[in-house]
Each structure stands twice: as structure tokens, then as C-alpha cells.
Amino acid sequence: MEFGIQFFPDVGPETKAADAYFRECLDLTGLCDALGYSHVRTVEHYFNAYGGYSPNPIVFLAAAAQRTARARLITGAVLPVFNNPLKLAGEIGMLDAISGGRLEVGFARAFLPHEFRRFRVNVNESRARFEEGVEQVRRLLEDENVSMAGRFHSFENVTSLPRPTQLPRPPFWVAALSTPDSFINAGRAAHSIMAIPMAGAKMAEMIGLYREAWRSAGHKGQGRVMLAFHMFTAPTRAEAVDIAREPLNRYLKSLVDAASDWTEGLSSADYPNYDKIIARLRQETFETQVEKRAAWVGSPADAIDAIADYNRQLGGFEIASMQVNFNTLTYDQAARSMRLFSEQVMPKFKKA
């Protein structure tokens, strides 16, 4: 299993200034090569303490590329629904060049109603915009002199620059929460899948659908699965819990607050059961997240047990992407946790 780090800001100016937040994130990124973390990942969100400090993951990852020579750089994820594919393809090619071919591109449909409202995009167009956007970006990266007539974006005879450093293009990931079709479609298209256990999806079932769709489409292997977890380790369980409990609870609250429209009457065929998903998340706490192995918090021995148990439940997954400085955790706290996890937990899961 590979272990990488992700940054999902859930703070605003009243909690931590943006320059301080990103200075800490980049300093933590600088630890990756020495400690053996395989990737750095960040999100695209807007306007809200939940994710709003990261409206463009490519900007952050360009800076991160200068702090690590080996870690892969992963968008987790860019949102075609709010981006012109011509601009997005160009930015991807640029970051792939800056990083020396270390970029991997995760795409997501977006799920926060307030973002759709402020961009004046219909939430019921989410799936169609996603599918069209991913395909147009793929063509622009793989081919030259591309012409495409879409429902939302059209262009003629375009060669996107810079051309990708990785050929034919950087690997693609698709973010999925709990909709079976999202997992199945990613497998059919030979895209890797990134998912989040915290939402309470039947993850073993969803991953099974993904791997079966991958095999049924005739692709070699079984695909790649990346799952996101909160992670904080300390020498003792008591110390880890004391430090991480309230920051994780505040993270959960910020998520539910940002997505509250789903529990206040909004519905969309593109997002079946999201009212129920957010209602379930409203009941989540630090304790329930740790219990269901969606958060790895405790001593190194606790983390080893949680990872091994969850891996058995799922029948195996390839990559863990861990939030290491969630909410108000400080740089020093996150750095100590990363070092301890690297020294005492990661060696237990290295390939023989």
C-alpha cells in the first residue's frame, strides 16, 4: 500500500490566514521525500471555509512540485463543471511540464449546492457537464488539431499547449462518493477511482463494482483505488485523541454546513439520496469516524490495526491519501504525526 498526504482546507480568515495555511502545507510537503510519502493532493472548492482556500489545486501543486522531487502531484479533484476545458487542458499540460511528468489528474462532479448557485450553473447539469468536460480534456491532451461540438463547450482545430510531458497524457482519476454508476463508469473507462469512506458508503461493494467493470471492459489488472482518511498519530492513544478530536469534529461540522442545502429541500436526479448522505454525516463524530476506520487516530499500533482491519474489509486497496493538518492542527503537530507514521506504521505495509 502507498501512503500520501492531502490538504483539504476547512478554515477561514478568522481561524488561520491563507498565507500561514499554505506556508504550513508547503513545509509539510517538503517532508514527503525523506519520509516516503508517495503523493501530495489537494481539492477545488470555493467561497466557504470548507475547501474555499483552494479554488485552484493546480496553483498549489505547482508550488508543491518545487518542494518534492519524487512525490506524485494529484488534483483531488478539479471540477469540469466550473471550468472551460480549453483552459483546464492547458493548465494540466503546464503543471505536468513544471513537475517533470509527476501530475495525475483527478476529476469530480462537485457536490456543494452553494457553488452551483454562485456560478449560476444548474445542479441538474452536473453529470452531463462532467462527462463532456472530462472527454474534451482527454482529447485535448491526447490529440492535436481537435474539434468538438458539445452541449456546453465547442471548439475547432485546437492544439492545446503545452503538450503533456507524460504520454499520451497524465493518468486520470475519478472522484466518487456513493453512486454505483460513478464507480462502474470509472472502471469501464480505465480511470482510477478516488473515494471517501467517511460518508458511510458501502465501500467494499462500490470497489467491487469498480473492479468488475474494469475487468469486464477488458483492461489489464484491476485498476487503482485511492481512499481518503484523516490521520493523526502520537506516542499514545490518549495524546492523539486529545489533540485531534475537536479539529476533526469541526471539520465534520464544516462539511455538513457547506452541504446543508441537501437537507433543506433541494433534490436532483444527478445526486440521488444526497439528502440522506448529508443527514448521516450530520450524525458523525470523531468517535464514529475512528470506530468505522474512516479516521486513523491514535498510537502507531492503533493506526496499524485500523489500516489492516479496513484493508481486510475491502479486500485490498492501493493508495491511502491522508489529511494530516485538518482544521486547526498546527504544523508542528502534523509534522510530528507524519514522522511517527512514516517510521512506525508505513514499514508494516511495504511490499515485500
Image (cartoon, rainbow, N blue to C red):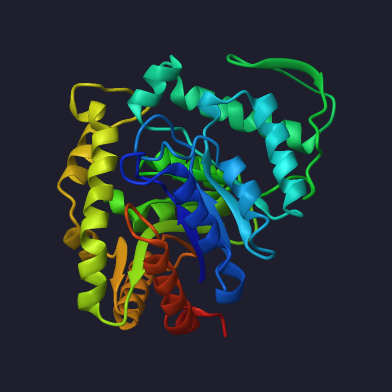
Q: Is residue 66 left or right of residue 24?
A: right
Residue 84 pos. (x, y %)? 62, 23
Depth check, front residue: 332 or 111: 332
Identify the residue at the far left of this view: 283
Is residue 201 something one can see in this rendering?
no
Q: In the figure, residue 188 lies in which quadrant?
A: top right
Image quadrant for the C terminus? bottom right
Q: In the figure, 225 relative to 17: above or below?
A: below
Q: In the figure, residue 178 lies in which quadrant?
A: top left
Residue at the image point whose x is 63% and y is 50% from the top: 63
Residue at the image point whose x is 22% and y is 45% from the top: 281
Residue 221 pos. (x, y %)? 61, 62
Depth check, front residue: 82 or 204: 82
Residue 29 pos. (x, y %)? 55, 61
Is residue 254 something one can see in this rendering?
yes
Residue at the image point whose x is 36% and y is 65% from the top: 231
How many numbered marks have been drawn onto this rendered protein structure?
A: 0
Residue at the image point whose x is 29% and y is 69% from the top: 297
Depth check, front residue: 128 or 341: 341
Residue 49 pos. (x, y %)? 34, 38
Q: Is residue 35 left or right of residue 203?
A: right
Q: In the figure, 234 relative to 270: above or below?
A: below
